[in-house]
Image (cartoon, coloured by chain):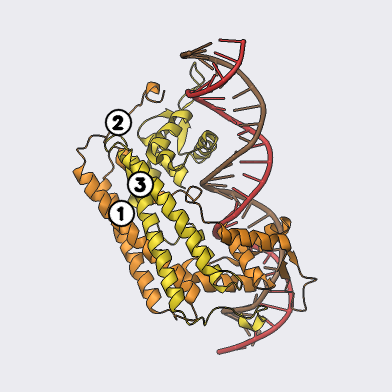
Chain colours: A yellow, B orange, C red, D brown
Amino acid sequence: MSIRNGLLALLEQGPMYGYQLRARFEASTGATWPLNVGQVYTTLARLERDGLVEPLGEPDAEGRVTYRITDRGRAEVESWFASPVDRERRPRDELAIKLAMALTTPGIDVHRVIQTQRTATLRSLQELTRLKAGADDVADAAWLLVLESMIFQAEAEVRWLDHCEIRIAEAPRAAAAPSPTPTPEAVR
Amino acid sequence: MSIRNGLLALLEQGPMYGYQLRARFEASTGATWPLNVGQVYTTLARLERDGLVEPLGEPDAEGRVTYRITDRGRAEVESWFASPVDRERRPRDELAIKLAMALTTPGIDVHRVIQTQRTATLRSLQELTRLKAGADDVADAAWLLVLESMIFQAEAEVRWLDHCEIRIAEAPRAAAAPSPTPTPEAVR
DNA sequence: CGACACATGTAACACGTTACATGATTTG
DNA sequence: CAAATCATGTAACGTGTTACATGTGTCG
């Protein structure tokens, strides 16, 4: 719902057309997550289908179609801002799942998996820091926050990876390899 | 790709049937992200379609259909473990986007948005800590790692939220409200 | 003129998710 | 017996994502 809600919030700032929405959206998330223009139109169509936005008259001379938020749309945005992002219904964390699986998969070098990820995360952390240094504190205020969000998360990820290595080193290799062919009884 | 890859990795540990896969998957991610059984079957069907798994003969007496990983599937798992989770192609962070949007939307109390989220995150942090305390260090090793991943992330989120408040307090309210109806020139 | 940015839109697909239908088996 | 658990499967939908088609305006 990130894009959907994001575009809707942008439209609450005033009527806009697709190309403009994309520019605004990218101004906030920056080069971080480039947004395919096509997606703006598909999302816009879905928002219109749901009665949250509506086209403002016919396309203008240059063929631009301006959209306006509806009352229902406004209510939706308000409710979005008023409610926290629930941890439970966030997308599954692929990295966490990967490591959990690596732990119980025989023949997988968990240490190596962790190190590979650690290196990659550190690299992207560098890149993020570089981007942050080059940003304008006032003009790119929103983008800066997004950037810093990613930095905080990447740092936490590195810390977690280090923590995992300690955990695994400590572990008496007990829960390492279950029987290759699990019996149905194990489930029951 | 979390579920898809996760199930595939489980099948590398040995042939299994759907219900079993779900039990195993939930044993690793725990009560954190409950997995609807139906999804196992849809995912299994897609894996079979892509030639990564194959049914192992006919359904047995109890109607259970066991699946086995193929060579292509094995290669896929290996490549999954060998490559890091790329930051760029991770799902957009809804919270970051929300705050970025809140910053530039007039009439939105950013402080309130942050506080609401902070409270919710702290609450889920408590719940996660509670779960961690009740987990068995050896039996639930994988789940513990997932749990701790979420804890680290939640902590980072709180820190980030606090950081945001400082940022906003410092800000000279410069990039606050752009003109309500942005001119096309702003995009060009 | 040719390349490029502007601008809209659609078709097709990916994965995730839920609700539902169906039946066998277990257990209180 | 009734309820719960085990077990499979499907239909339908949601968002996100890309590739493509199409056309206009601009600028070197």
Q: Which mark is residue A129?
A: 3
Judging from the image, mark 3 belongs to the subunit labelled A
Determine the secondary structure under disc 2. Answer: loop
Chain of the residue under the numbered disc 1 shown in the image = B
Can marks 1 and 3 be said to lie on one chain?
Answer: no
Rendered image: mark on residue A119: none
Q: Which residue is mark 2?
A: B178
Verify CB contact (< 8 Å) between mark 1 and mark 2: no
Q: CA distance from mark 1 to mark 3?
A: 15 Å
**Amino acid type, mark 2:** Pro
The one nearer the camera, B80 or A78, is B80
Residue behind mark 1: B160
Q: Residues within 10 Å of mark 2 (few under 14, many from 20)?
A: few
Decide if residue B56 is on the left or right side of residue A106: right
Residue A37 image offset from top left, x and y in percent: 52, 33
Residue B175 seen in render: yes
Q: Are marks 1 and 2 on the same chain?
A: yes
Compared with A57, A71 (above or below) is below
- Of circles 1 and 3, the one toward us is 3
User: What residue is drawn where x is 40% and y is 22%?
Assistant: B184
Q: Amino acid at mark 1?
A: Trp
